[in-house]
Amino acid sequence: MKEKLLKKIILLDGDNTLWDTNEIFTKAQLKLLEGLENRNLDIDPEIEFKTLRNFDDVLIKKFKTPEYDFRVLALALYLFYNHWNKDDAIDEAIRVLKNDKKIRGKRIADKCYEAFKKEMKEHPPLFEGAKDALSILKKWNGALILLSEGNAGRIERIVNHHKIGKYFDLIFSGEKSLKKFNEAVKEGRKILRRKDPKTSKFDVIVIGDLLDKDILFGNRIGAITIHKPGGYKPHQKPTNKMEVPKYTAKDFSEIINILSN
């Protein structure tokens, strides 16, 4: 079994795969909405949460990162709830923040953002069975790489908080791309050869929660892909054949079973 499992490069996602980022984001985003509600805007945070997530999706696409300046989100929502058209509200919020313009509601939006930012300082919890799974994967002596999108400092803080850095041979952070995945595989190959100079053949495994990021790029590099849905976009459906995973697992025990066979 050890020999069979040795030649594997495992690229494991962090946010909403290894730890529950969505839990923290949900609390923070609700705080932002509560701040707007307290400014005499006629909204119900629980009801309007879907609206916020819709704005968030648009802004992620515009900024090409899930960690954009969230002051834009706060201001865009403020304008929207003050009868602005959605697209106009988003565009105006971006212009205001980019050019440091003054606009009615900016100070209120900034205060809502501060409540959001305070909540975001909390560390997201690991999913059940995550540490046990990491321990098992480490013992297999392959190349275990954390490949997580987002700010490197934030990823490092989460890893250090949960004391899981020792399980990884390498940590990659930043925007996910085909180039990033290929770089991770290249480094994984070096790791395998340091552990066993005779290594020539190996499997690449990609484990993540997003079909349009983890599974798409995993399939494009020819990896064995495992989709582990998280709280963020749990009902995501493939839009093309490259977003179809080879396996789907509901938790880490299923992932270990898949990789053990």
Image: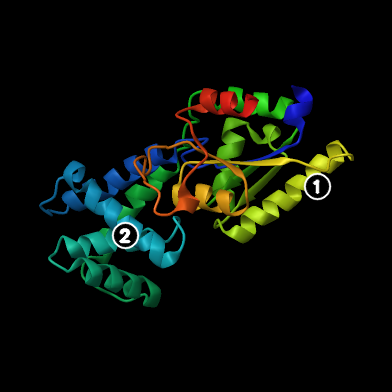
Instruction: Tell me if residue 172 comes above or below residue 144 in the rendering.
Output: below
- The residue at 74%/52% (across/down) is 186
Q: Local crowd at mark 2 within 10 Å, few (<14), some, or many (≥20)?
A: many
Task: Indicate which disc residue 20 carries.
Answer: none
Instruction: Tell me if residue 86 comes above or below residue 6 in the rendering.
Output: below
Do the residues bearing badges 1 and 2 touch, measured as CB atoms within 8 Å? Answer: no
- The residue at 26%/64% (across/down) is 76
Task: Indicate which disc residue 73 carries.
Answer: 2
Quarter that holds the C terminus: top right
Question: Extreme right residue here?
Answer: 197
- Is 120 positioned to the left or the right of 93 in the image? right
Pick whichever, 45 or 236, lies toward us. Answer: 236
- The residue at 55%/53% (across/down) is 217
Residue 38 visible to the viewer: no
In percent of width and height, residue 253 lies at 53, 22
Q: Could you say whether the residue bearing mark 2 is in a helix, strand or loop? A: helix
Q: On the image, numbered disc 1 is attached to which residue?
A: 190
In percent of width and height, residue 162 lies at 57, 31
Residue 138 visible to the viewer: yes
Residue 165 sits in which quadrant? top right
Residue 92 sits in which quadrant? bottom left
